[in-house]
Amino acid sequence: MIDFDNVSMRYDPNHTALSNLTFHMAKGEMAFLTGHSGAGKSTLLKLAALLERPTNGKIVVNGCNYKRVSRRKIPYIRRNIGLIFQNPHLLPELTVFDNVALPLVIHGFSHQEIQKRVRAALDKVSLGNKERCYPKGLSGGEQQRVGIARAVVNRPALLLADEPTGNLDPDLSAEIMNLFQEFNEVGVTVLVASHDLPLIASMRHRIITLKQGRLFDAGAQLQWQANHVQEEGVLV
Amino acid sequence: MSLSDRWHKLLERHAHASVSSLGRLWRTPFATMLTLLVIGVALALPACLYVLLGNVQSFGQGWDKGAQISLFLKVSVSQATAQDLASQLKQRDDVANVTYISPQDGLKKFQAQTGIGDIVEDLHSNPLPAVLEVQPTLSVQTPKSIEALLTDLKRLPQVDIAELDMQWLKRLYTIIEVIRRGVWALAALLGLAVLLVIGNTIRLSTQNRRQEIEIIKLIGATNSFIRRPFLYSGMYYGLFGAIIAWILVSITISWLNVPVVQLAKLYSSQFSLHGLGFLGGVKLACVGIVLGFFGSWFSVNRHLRANEL
């Protein structure tokens, strides 16, 4: 699903975020990405989501070689990737429902289809009763769940999350991680960057460790995951 | 995806963009109204001048058949002789057409054109002579050759007066042309002002919504998706501004029309100012929409280029 081949990223001569990184993630796999701040976690996710382009190296995600993607085609690539950030990036003047509906509106789904899918996504994150609220009226955990609903409403094959629990207390964090696991169980490939080691260690998934822009430990793919790989994109 | 599906999707997106941008304008009524008034005034000024110019032109119409020589025949000339002369003149190479106007026809025409019928009716006899209207062929219509034709015709024994009524018309049209160009120059300048006002308004709104644009880009919005609501806003500004301008022009014209009609009445004329009219209003609206479209197009594209992700 994700193939990094000798990827380097230099922002300027003195600042190398990633150097010669090679790693692979299979379809339907779930993995955590960890390391100190500045180890290159965010950069890796940005490259995987085509928010930035590498200085060197080859990136293939979902069968698509990013080098061959023209600028005009980038939006269409992003539609197949669910992105989740530490800050959920909701639009304050839209209701929860409209926030979650945005990717579908962008995609041009019909009104009925949007209603159906948004309700399903909100139910999945247990916020079905909050669809008319505005983000301001929600707690941090709830806002993050709205962000997750928005990321999955399009039924992407890949979920990338950058410190999704960074602002949350341990209970809420575990809840969010369980959500990701549920998505993974229906076939979505999930890569979560987090430095909450105790939490991710408890989840029995592969842990990829970065250190100063290099791959420190690629982690071991656990056996049970391979058996759980199902058809892509069956979600919500 | 079939063609009709795509078409349907596109329509749905456009509907969404047009409605949501209208809603956005509605939610900031004061700022929107202020912008619309600026646009309205900027558009109303050239539109008003344009309408007034049209009125002056229509006032001059009817005399607008180019050079024409009127031969006023001597009263002693009979109708038969006059018609003979007319057919004789028609043979000439430099004459395209000759119209015979009997004294009776002349009187009727005079009444109709001037509107002083009441006075004419009081007359006991017809004071008008028979007239031959001579239209030179187009190739002759240079001032010099027309002069030559005129002197020729003047020498005819049946002709009392030969008159070339062109000089004043020429002056009038030259003046109108000067004013017309002035109006266009002003219209171009004020059109540019409207373009800039709308462009700047949209620029501010892209800046206010910078974060929103960034977020929807992250979730896969294309540039055209981001651009669309702004383009609609720009076009709404142009359209509503034009409607305000239309109203302003109508008010101005009807205000001016009162003394104009009074003045015309003093000359026993039925002349009155015509306004922008439906077609003129539609044209004005189109101009507004086009200016709005391009104003916002430049602003949004600049923003998108500056914030490439």
Image (spheres, coloured by chain):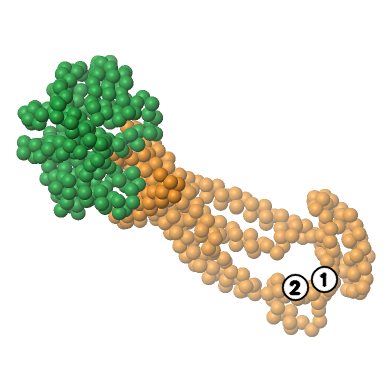
User: Dot 1: what SS?
Assistant: strand
Indicate left or right for B58 with A132 as reference: right
Q: Is residue A23 above or below residue A138?
A: above
Dot 1 surroundings within 10 Å: few (below 14), some, or many (20 or more)?
some
Indicate left or right for B137 with A195 as reference: right
Residue B159 in the image: x percent, y percent?
89, 66
Residue A223 in the image: x percent, y percent?
15, 26
Q: What amino acid type is highlighted by mark number 2? A: Lys
Indicate left or right for B196 with A112 as reference: right
Chain letter, colour orange in render: B
Q: Which chain letter goes with mark 2?
A: B
Q: Which residue is mark 1?
A: B101
Can residue A168 be spotted in the picture? no
Residue at (33, 34) in percent of width and height:
A77
Q: Which chain letter goes with mark 1?
A: B
Discs 1 and 2 share one subunit = yes
Relative depth, front residue between B28 and A20: A20
**Numbered label attached to residue B109:** 2
Q: Quadrant of the N terminus of chain B?
A: top left
The mark nearer the N terminus, 1 or 2, is 1
Relative depth, front residue between B9 and B158: B9
Q: Quadrant of the C terminus of chain B?
A: top left
Chain letter, colour green in render: A
Can residue B244 be spotted in the picture? yes
Q: Is residue B105 above or below residue A179?
A: below
Q: CA distance from mark 1 to mark 2?
A: 10 Å
User: Dot 2: what SS?
Assistant: helix
Residue A169 in the image: x percent, y percent?
7, 37
Residue at (67, 52) in percent of width and height:
B174
